Image: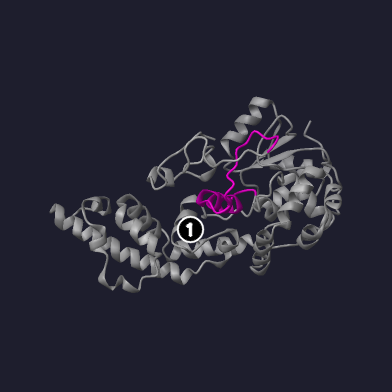
Amino acid sequence: MREVGPVDPQDPEHLARPVWEFTACPLEPPGGAGAQPEGESDTRCPDPECPFQVAGAIEHFAGRGALDIEGFGSQRIRLLLDLGLLADVAGIFEVDWDRLAELRAEVGAWASAATAAAQERSGDPRARLDAVAEVDLARTRPADAAGSSLPTDLVAELAADPALFKATADGLRGLGDEAVTGLRAAIDGARDRPLANLLVGLNIRHLGPSGAQALALAFGDLGRIVDADVDAMATADGVGTVIAESVRAWFDDADHRALVDRLVAAGVNTEGPEESAEPQVLLGKVVVVTGTLDGYTRDEAEAAITSRGGKSPGSVSKKTTAVVVGASPGASKVTKAESLGVPILDQAAFEHLLETGELPG
């Protein structure tokens, strides 16, 4: 994580950075609005409506380890936020795709008019959208845009900032019919992610993948977790009082409960895994999977490990028992495993491990 801030929030280079790269508020000078919880070293933004907080929460929810929505990265999230098509994590399942198509056509027409004006001004018929910095964008907006559904404040920002105008036009161009079809399919598929992934995606303080999995296993249903008291949650293996109090406080917030209700209405999976009938041969073992395995999706490979009592985090550490390497693995994970002396297994060895709990001799 890099120390960045303050910066110009409309700087195109800044807009391309994931929110989690920032350890200092990019909108405040040093010593600004950040708050440091008692007993902790991290400084946290106290404003839940901060645009960087909102964008970061959505990026986390859609990222790997949570709902893992392919194609829903930081730039598209920022674009949908700017266009008023997205406001929070539940809004991922509520995007008005017809309106997106209308906005794409509207901004596309504006971009074409601005490009034509830039070509006329420069005398270069090959001038592209990059050249619109030399023209008055407000004047090039098509006259029939009076009934625009673009947010009024965004229109003013686009007209005043050629770099933002270009980034928005390019982003919308990249969301053509084919891309939207793929993105909608990815979002629909995310509804079926395991309950533990949903809990991780909610970004509840102190609750990581292990704790989320423990709660999903212990209670078996999101509704029962929402209604559980601290003592009941704290008894789940690997949870404890600190995590339980944080989860309870999160669900006690009325806005959070409303958000969960919208997610449930959107059809996300709220059922935890059934008690495993598999022999618990991987108890105490940590197995990381990288790359593609025949006959397994990423979630299925991790489920094969956890259903046998093991853990399957997304990173390699000294605690890792083995790293399973499939096709096109992450080079950093393999390198880390080699540097730590962690055993590296192929698919045959992985199957043996699942069956016996033993590493190959």
The answer to whether residue 141 is above or below residue 122 is below
Q: Which residues are magenta?
A: 38-65
Residue 229 is situated, as x and y percent measured from the top left of the image, at 83, 55
**Quarter holding residue 20:** top right
Q: How is this picture coloured?
A: one colour
The answer to whether residue 150 is above or below residue 208 is below
Viewer-nearest residue: 347 or 193: 193
91 vs 275, left or right, is: left
Q: What residue did someone put label 1 on?
A: 81
Residue 136 is situated, as x and y percent measured from the top left of the image, at 22, 57
- Count of picture labels: 1
Q: Amino acid at mark 1?
A: Leu
112 vs 64, left or right, is: left
280 vs 47, left or right, is: right
Q: The residue tagged with tag 1: helix, strand or loop?
A: helix
Residue 155 is situated, as x and y percent measured from the top left of the image, at 35, 61
Can you see residue 218?
yes
Viewer-nearest residue: 230 or 164: 230
The N terminus: image quadrant: top right
| Residue ranking furthest to the left | 123
Q: What residue is shown at x 26% (from left), y 68% (from top)? A: 142
Residue 354 is situated, as x and y percent measured from the top left of the image, at 79, 44
Viewer-nearest residue: 144 or 330: 144
Q: What residue is shown at x 28% (from left), y 73% (from top)? A: 144
Can you see residue 113?
no
Q: What residue is shown at x 30% (from left), y 52% (from top)? A: 162
Please tell me whether residue 120 belongs to the stretch shown in magenta: no
The C terminus: image quadrant: top right
| CA neighbours of label 1 inside 10 A, class few (<14), some (14 to 19), many (20+) | some
